[in-house]
Amino acid sequence: MFFYQVYGLCLGSDFPLSEFPDRHGGQLAADIRLCHGAPQHTYERCISLGFNVSPQQPVDFEWPKRGMLLSNACYHVAYPNGLEVIVDGLGAAIYILNADPFEFEDFPVYLSGPLLGFALRLRGSLCLHASVIDLGGYAIALMAPSGGGKSTTAAAFARRGFRVMSDDVLVLTPGAGGESLAHTGVPWVRLCEDALKELGRASWRGQGQSHLGNKRRVQINQGEQALNALPLRAIYSAVNLDADLAISNISGAKALLGLLGNLFPGPSYQLPHSRRTDELKQLRQLLAAVPLRGLAYRRKLSDLPSLCDALISDSRNLQAASAVSKMQNE
């Protein structure tokens, strides 16, 4: 078995995953197993899930076309490109039913994104659709609709020497003192050709063209990827993608609805009712500990420096205010 460290867990795989960070040291016991072949279980009944295509996605975006909830805790998902998997209902295993999953060029993206995201949510982790950046001892998250510039902004931070923790998935678990810890994902960002040309470094290794949004997976150096979980200082949510740069606070019901709309993977991957109830509590706790900030900006590569400067300045102000608050409470 091959072992990898991703989203704070040990992933044990029946086959090598060259683009995933290796697990070094510690106990090599898999939290989630990636298995090649069908599980050795008997299922009593199946419930069909309704997978819908988001109108915000391009028409060639490959969403799951069907799925079934297996009553003794397994989910079956088949994607339009032919990739077919079963996810254990406790998030303990992912079974790949295809003879060769790597015949699907985007298999690493499916695995690191919706499949592991779904398994993690089943395990009790909170997962949001966001890019995550290490700004020096603390993390910030960037939420935006697909095509809204999350990955491009993350790459701009990496070019400045900051570390990218995750390109597309924010995985959170509780930390000490009520903090929310953001975990490291896979060492790549997915960039369009114009962003790659503008921001790419010679040391970044571009993978083949992706069918998921026509982007390339760009491997970044391990030195440019944060390796440990960090306290999340703020979540920045795009509220206007064609406006002057501005940052505002989002609170109350609007904040809760904003996070609910960014749970990852989306509503097509239906969780058990008890887990959805737990997630609602987790989101309320997150908003009590981490500010949700509204972000207005223009999706222009030329505006990236000012956008990064604004995020750094605002998050450092929040970090300083948090430190003062902790001192006053001690």
Image (tube, grey):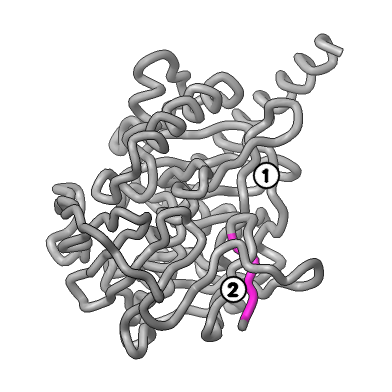
Quarter of the figure that contains the C terminus: top right
Instruction: Tell me the mark number nearer the camera, choosing from 2 and 1.
Output: 2
Question: What residue appears at the point 81 percent right and 10 percent down from the top-left corner?
Answer: 329
Query: In the rendered structure, are the residues bearing label 2 and label 1 in contact, judged by CB atoms less than 8 Å apart?
Result: no
- Percent x, y of residue 143: 42, 41
Question: What residue appears at the point 51 percent right and 43 percent down from the top-left corner?
Answer: 124
Quadrant in the picture for residue 326: top right
Q: Secondary structure at mark 1?
A: loop
Quarter of the figure that contains the N terminus: bottom right
Question: What residue appears at the point 39 percent right and 34 percent down from the top-left corner?
Answer: 274
Image position of 134 (left or right of 36): right
What is the span of residues highlighted in magenta in the rendered image? 2-6
Vertical placement of 256 versus 107: above or below? above
Image position of 285 (left or right of 160): left
User: Which of the pair 65/132 is nearer the observer?
Assistant: 65
- Percent x, y of residue 266: 30, 47
State the separation of the CA atoms marked 2 and 1.
Answer: 30 Å
Q: Is residue 168 visible?
A: no
Tell me the kind of residue under disc 1.
Answer: Leu
- Percent x, y of residue 250: 43, 19
Q: Neighbour class for label 2 at 10 Å: few (<14), some, many (≥20)?
A: many
Tag 2 residue: 12
Asked if the magenta segment contains residue 3, the reply would be yes
Quadrant in the picture for residue 106: bottom left
Tag 1 residue: 135
Q: Secondary structure at mark 2?
A: strand
Q: Main secondary structure of the magenta part?
A: strand
Tell me the kind of residue under disc 2.
Answer: Gly
